[in-house]
Image (spheres, rainbow, N blue to C red):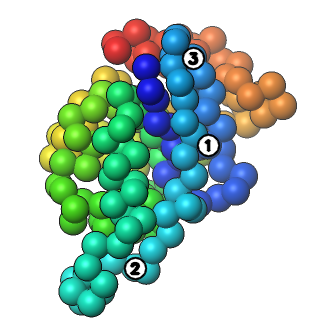
């Protein structure tokens, strides 16, 4: 199974990248491609820029990557209760190619933060709007207090309850 995994964060030290990488590796028989959204940086989306630039090649390439995957795993970073600007911009450009951004693929949605909220606000927003963008959400998990529940050196979740939740979502595939 071809799994495309990425963190919706532009941070080079993203805890969401660590979480999405861990989760994708738990999927049996998966060929995982870990994508970095920094490779898809574009000008800020606006209708005026779209008229001037058309559809950027990077947005087309991102849409194609999503289409080539058999499954998508995303971990959302939360900035002030919402998506990161980097992800939102990439998503906005890609949705102009086709509103069905996720192309009816099975999707696992995750989020984490250093605090007790676990980026729950952005995760709820992503899950709540996913059907508008043709995401077949198989499940979602918020990981609160990342550094208390994840061993960064080993690259794995340490909280048995959260490990079980992630495995339960993977079992929905």
Q: Earlier in the sequence, mark 2 or mark 1?
A: 1
- Mark 1: secondary structure: helix
- Mark 2: secondary structure: loop
Where's residue 67, x and y in %? Answer: 31, 41
Q: Are marks 2 and 1 in contact (CB under 8 Å)?
A: no
Question: Which residue corresponds to mark 1?
Answer: 17
Q: Is residue 168 left or right of residue 129?
A: right
Q: Earlier in the sequence, mark 2 or mark 3?
A: 3
Residue situated in front as seen by the camera: 42 or 46? 42
- Mark 3: secondary structure: loop
Q: Are marks 1 and 3 in contact (CB under 8 Å)?
A: no
Residue occupying image coordinates x 44% and y 27%: 2
Q: CA distance from mark 2 to mark 3?
A: 35 Å
Question: Which residue corresponds to mark 2?
Answer: 44
Question: Which residue corresponds to mark 3?
Answer: 26
Q: Look at the image and tell me whether residue 135 can be seen.
A: yes
Q: CA distance from mark 2 to mark 1?
A: 23 Å
Crowd class of label 2 (few under 14; some 14 to 19; many from 20; radius 10 Å)? some
Quadrant, the C terminus = top left
Q: Is residue 133 left or right of residue 68?
A: left
Residue situated in front as seen by the camera: 147 or 76? 76
């Amino acid at each position: 199974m071809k799994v495309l995994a990425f963190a919706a964060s532009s941070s080079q030290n993203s805890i969401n990248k660590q979480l999405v990488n861990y989760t994708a590796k738990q999927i049996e028989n998966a060929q995982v491609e870990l994508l970095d959204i920094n490779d898809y940086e574009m000008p800020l989306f606006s209708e005026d820029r779209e008229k001037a630039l058309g559809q950027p090649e990077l947005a087309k390439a991102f849409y194609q990557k999503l289409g080539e995957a058999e499954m998508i795993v995303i971990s959302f970073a939360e900035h002030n209760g919402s998506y990161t600007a980097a992800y939102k911009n990439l998503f906005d450009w890609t949705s102009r190619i086709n509103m069905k951004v996720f192309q009816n693929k099975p999707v696992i949605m995750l989020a984490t933060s250093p605090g007790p909220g676990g980026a729950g606000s952005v995760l709820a927003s992503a899950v709540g709007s996913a059907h508008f963008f043709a995401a077949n959400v198989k499940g979602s998990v918020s990981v609160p207090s990342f550094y208390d529940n994840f061993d960064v050196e080993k690259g794995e979740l340490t909280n048995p309850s959260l490990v079980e939740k992630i495995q339960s979502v993977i079992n929905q595939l």
